[in-house]
Image: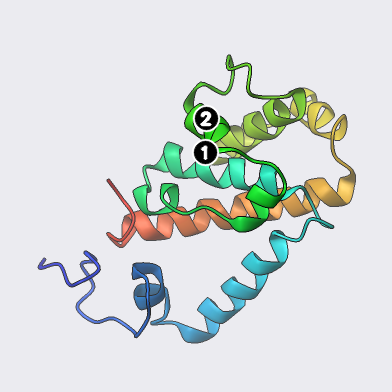
Amino acid sequence: MEATRTGTWLPIEAEGATALDRVFGLTPAAYETFREVDGALWDPDRVDPALVELCRLRIAQLIGCDAELEVRHDQARVAGLTEEKIADLRRWPTSPCYSDADHAVLNFAEKFVIDASSVDDHDCAALRAHLSDPEIAALTTAIALFDATTRFQVALGIGGA
């Protein structure tokens, strides 16, 4: 099928500044709700935005969504996430850049994306050692949203390699 200006195989697009705007915008009510939920998940009172951003970027790496890898959220920078740490993300299990909390969160995010049923008691205990239950709920919501959005972009041809 012929690609349009976003690279998607969909024959029509909505108005918008980004490829995601132009494709997700075809369902405006859903897109508005997505944007509200996404915005709420970056609130540092819910969970550390640096952890949220690490998960978002790792999910983009796992699924192969280049569009998401190019984005950086200001809230994560304010929370102290550095480009050095982001550059070492593919090596997070062995990189000295990553804390025990980072390891727990990234392990959980990877298992969620690859096989959510593989999350076990050890993984949950590791999360609970670093995050409160409300933080875990917010982080899991963010991971689920990023997983869905990233797959949406790749499947519709707007975010893949």
In the rendered image, the residue lying farthest to the left is 2
Residue at point 35%, 74% (across, down):
23
Give amino acid for label 2.
Leu
Q: Residue at x 80, y 33 (%)?
A: 127
| Residue at 54%, 40% in the rendered image | 113
Q: Quadrant of the N terminus?
A: bottom left
Answer few, some or many: residues within 10 Å of disc 1's Cα (few below 14, many 20 plus, some between 14 and 19).
Answer: many
Residue 81: percent from left, percent from top: 64, 41
Q: Earlier in the sequence, mark 2 or mark 1?
A: 1
* Contact, mark 2 vs mark 1 (Cβ under 8 Å): yes
SS of the residue at dot 1? helix
Task: Give the quarter of the image for residue 41.
Answer: bottom right
Which scheme is used to colour this image of the protein? rainbow
- Looking at numbered disc 1 in the image, what kind of residue is underneath it? Arg
147 w.r.t. 29: above or below: above
Image position of 159 (left or right of 27): left
- Image point (76%, 47%), residue name: 48
Per the image, the residue denoted by label 2 is 89
Q: Secondary structure at mark 2?
A: helix
Q: Give the left or right position of residue 45, taking residue 149 as reference.
A: right
Residue occupied by mark 1: 58
Residue 125 position within the rendered picture, expressed as x and y whole percent measured from the top left:
84, 28
